[in-house]
Image: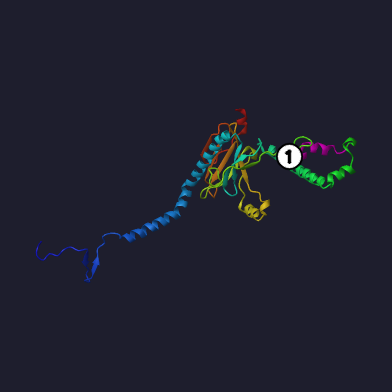
Amino acid sequence: MMRGSQPRTSKSVSDTGVFVRGSAGFTLIEMIVVMSIISALLLVMLPVLSSVLGVDQRKAAQELSATLRYVYDESVVQNAPMRIAYDLDHNRWWVEVADGPVRIFRDRGEKEAFDEFLADKAESDADVAEKSERERQNIPTMSELFSQLGPSDDEGGGGGAGMMGAIFGGGGMAPGARGGEYKPNEFHPLGDEEDDFAARELPGDVRFWGVWTPQSGDEVVKPMDEYELAAMRDTPAEEQKWTVVYTHIFPGGYMEDTVVYLSNPEGDDITSIVVEPLTGRVRVIKGLEDLPDLRDREQR
């Protein structure tokens, strides 16, 4: 070492004669603070990025299409009709299994006629129950009072009531049938909270834009708007009716024609999930897919 030389240090003398520290890099505390800020920003931005990039929508479409295919196979294994329920107003869906006979319809007209039949039948069942209770208490029903005052079937009166009784009376399809024997389309949820079939919500900002099945005719069933939702929430719980659509699956290898539309909250970014009824194939298509032409189905 040369005489008079000084050892190097991390400090230098400024023009004012004050020692200042050289910039050798970040300290550990500074790095922790920076990483914390970056992590917080990622947590805030990740849902936004997922929505913008369509990650949640793709995830929801893949999960729903996988469930449709799985239930198609599960219906055969359990030898029972099943269905997937889409709660359009709450963006939820779940799987149900049938408790008895199941009937679906080719169009809205058939469904409305059958719903009317079930409503008449329910009213008839209530009359039968009331009559049974009154007989138990030896109190005549109103219909019995009118029958005593009016003409009998032999005199040309009451024939319509007798025919209705044969169709609806007692719940069966024959006179004298007991109440509650004919109960189609009764289902119960298949899964619980920890099961693969448990009710699930669409992730993030994904929404049901609408669902179509042949039972809705040539229209897509859509969720309520904000005003309808507000009005329904103000309705007593026992009277609330939400928009729920079903895809029915049968053990014979048939899944009901269905198109499910998923979208962002604005409804301008749509993914379509299309069900092929005879094969159980499910296709995920980006964009608003056209409804299938049922006439083409009938010609196959």
Q: Is residue 9 left or right of residue 253?
A: left
Residue 250: % across, % down: 60, 34
| Figure quadrant of residue 39 | bottom left
Q: Give the residue number, with chain letter if any, for mark 1.
A: 117
Residue 151: % across, % down: 90, 40
Residue 253: % across, % down: 58, 32
**In percent of the image, x 59 and y 38: which residue is there?**
258
Q: Main secondary structure of the magenta part?
A: helix
Magenta run includes residue 158: yes
Of residue 19 and residue 203, the one placed in the foreground of this image is: 203
The answer to whether residue 54 shows anywhere in this view is no
Magenta run includes residue 159: yes
The answer to whether residue 36 shows anywhere in this view is yes
Is 205 situated above or below 179? below
Secondary structure at badge 1 equals helix
Quadrant in the picture for the N terminus = bottom left
Please state which amino acid type lies under the numbered disc 1. Phe
Quadrant in the picture for the C terminus = top right
**Magenta range:** 157-170
